[in-house]
Amino acid sequence: MTHRLHFPDHFTWGSATAAYQIEGAANADGRLPSIWDVFCQVPGKVRNGDTGDVADDHYHRMEGDLDLMAALGLPSYRFSVSWPRVVPGGSGPVNAAGLDFYQRLVDGLLERNITPLLTLYHWDLPQALQNDGGWTNRETVGRFVDYAEVIGRALGDRVPTITTLNEPWCSAFLGHSSGVHAPGITDNAAAITAAHHLNLAHGRAVTALRAVVPSSTQLSITLNLAQVYPATDTPADVEAASHVDAIANRIFLDPILRGAYPSDLLHTTRHITNWAFVAEGDLTDINAPIDVLGVNFYAPSRVTAATDEVRAQVTGRWVNDPSQADAGASPWPGTDLAYSVSQPGPYTGMGWPIVPESFTDLLLRVRRDYPEIPMVITENGASFDDEVTSDGEVHDADRIDYVRRHLAAVHAAIQGGADVRGYYLWSFMDNFEWAWGYSKRFGMVHVDYDSLARTPKDSALWFRDVIKNNAVELPED
Ligand code: GBH
């Protein structure tokens, strides 16, 4: 016996990728380096010295990949545009050949009845802008708005949803606090400055896009959100969790959806920055109305207050989980107040704990605290060591189990009143997993990195049925 959970009518199903992770063709047709091309050249930053030079070679194999999406019954596809392909210098001339790739991509999707969801920025800042300070430089905001307008004008008539930024938390804090992502800076004040400029770039791009895209176009931002649980219910741990929640979640949610930074955040970071980079009018600009919030979810966090006793027990400042134990600096400025603690398993292949209930908690929390905004799950998925058989099949029961449980969690949130409109599985195919290079696979399609052959995994066939039924089947347990 199985138990079927039906999703609402018109629920959008899809799968997601990002430009630098799949395209390759790093030097093709006028593209110039992004911060990730440069970061990959720094010894020790990316596992095995991997780079995005070739990746899945999607740039040259796009038509075949679209055929595969159609064969797998995907109603929608989320991709990102490579800024350094379209405006290679970060500002200045548009590269027609680069833009043409996305014209063909969008047309190819529409021909196959696959609805595009376009992300303007998934971490690949043109290096030319980084040379002037990147996201720590307020000038970058204007460059992003110009680039957003170029894309809005060129593609806005055929793309029903445009997302400005993917996970600005990662750009700001993994890029500028822990330094495990490009541009690899470790400066907490710079990270908070970058977070503000990313917020401002988002809000001003939304306003600029409104003027050039059809009125029906949905504008959005994607945030990586995670519930932050206190390790115990002592007041100190509860306060630590609230602090991390502010620097991880509310630093984006509050200005974007309420037009103000959280007052507790301004207080807990006051020894790092005086927030003088926030100018008159910025918060009104950031608060530009959006139509839908993209939510990426992988795992929750669990934290404890940094008492002397805790300090004596932990070796590093950043001890969240097995995979991060040796990662060095914390990505949470001000975490001299809080330490991440390891959580009980089971874990994914990234070492991230599998806690589907926290996904329900998160969606209901967004519903409660920001009640007006509809949500789309723009990423959820997992990396595991998939089993490739000698006859070329790829068995990934762990991934099916992860996605099944997380879909049930989304369903529970919808039942509880959360307004969730769609779900995009990360990722369509195995790809360049940032600092982990090609050592981690998130795809529902397997990629052989020698031949670049694509093979749908069991999860892709399973997901095709979920889409067809608009329902997920749970074992009766
Ligand atoms: C997303 O980032 C990206 O958008 C996507 O490009 C990427 O391939 C995908 O996820 C898989 O990684 O850091 O130990 O506290 C997700 C980044 C992952 C950052 C989970 C926060 C929390 C676990 N997030 N992480 S930990």
Image: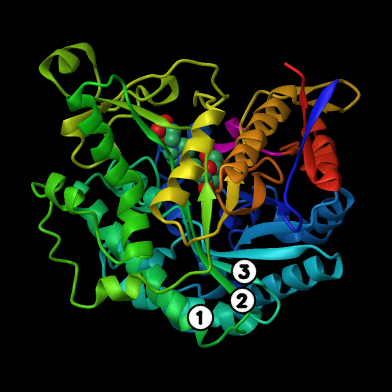
Q: Position of residue 245 (x, y in %)?
A: 31, 41
Q: Position of residue 391 (x, y in %)?
A: 91, 24
Tell me the residue at 45%/82% (across/down).
Answer: 208
Q: Which mark is residue 32?
A: none
Q: Secondary structure at mark 1?
A: helix
Height in image: 151 above or below 72? below
Classify residue 468 as left or right of residue 53.
Answer: right
1 and 2 marks in contact (CB < 8 Å) = yes
- Colour scheme of the picture: rainbow
Disc nearer the start of the sequence (1/2):
1
Q: Which mark is residue 209?
A: 1
Residue extent of the magenta highlight? 436-443
Q: Which residue is mark 3?
A: 161
Gap between marks 2 and 3 measured at Cα: 6 Å
Gap between marks 1 and 2 measured at Cα: 9 Å
- The label nearer to you, 1 versus 2, is 2
Q: Position of residue 55 (x, y in %)?
A: 64, 47
Q: Is residue 440 magenta?
A: yes
Q: Looking at this view, is 327 or 235 the one in front?
A: 235
Q: Secondary structure at mark 3?
A: strand
- The quadrant of the picture occupied by the C terminus is top right
Establish whether ligand 1 lies closer than 8 Å to the Cβ of label 2. no
Q: Secondary structure at mark 2?
A: loop
Mark 1 crowdedness (10 Å alpha carbons): few <14, some 14-19, many ≥20: many
The total number of labels drawn is 3
Gap between marks 1 and 3 measured at Cα: 11 Å
- The quadrant of the picture occupied by the N terminus is top right
Height in image: 320 above or below 456? above
Instruction: Say which amino acid is labelled 2.
Output: Thr
2 and 3 marks in contact (CB < 8 Å) = yes
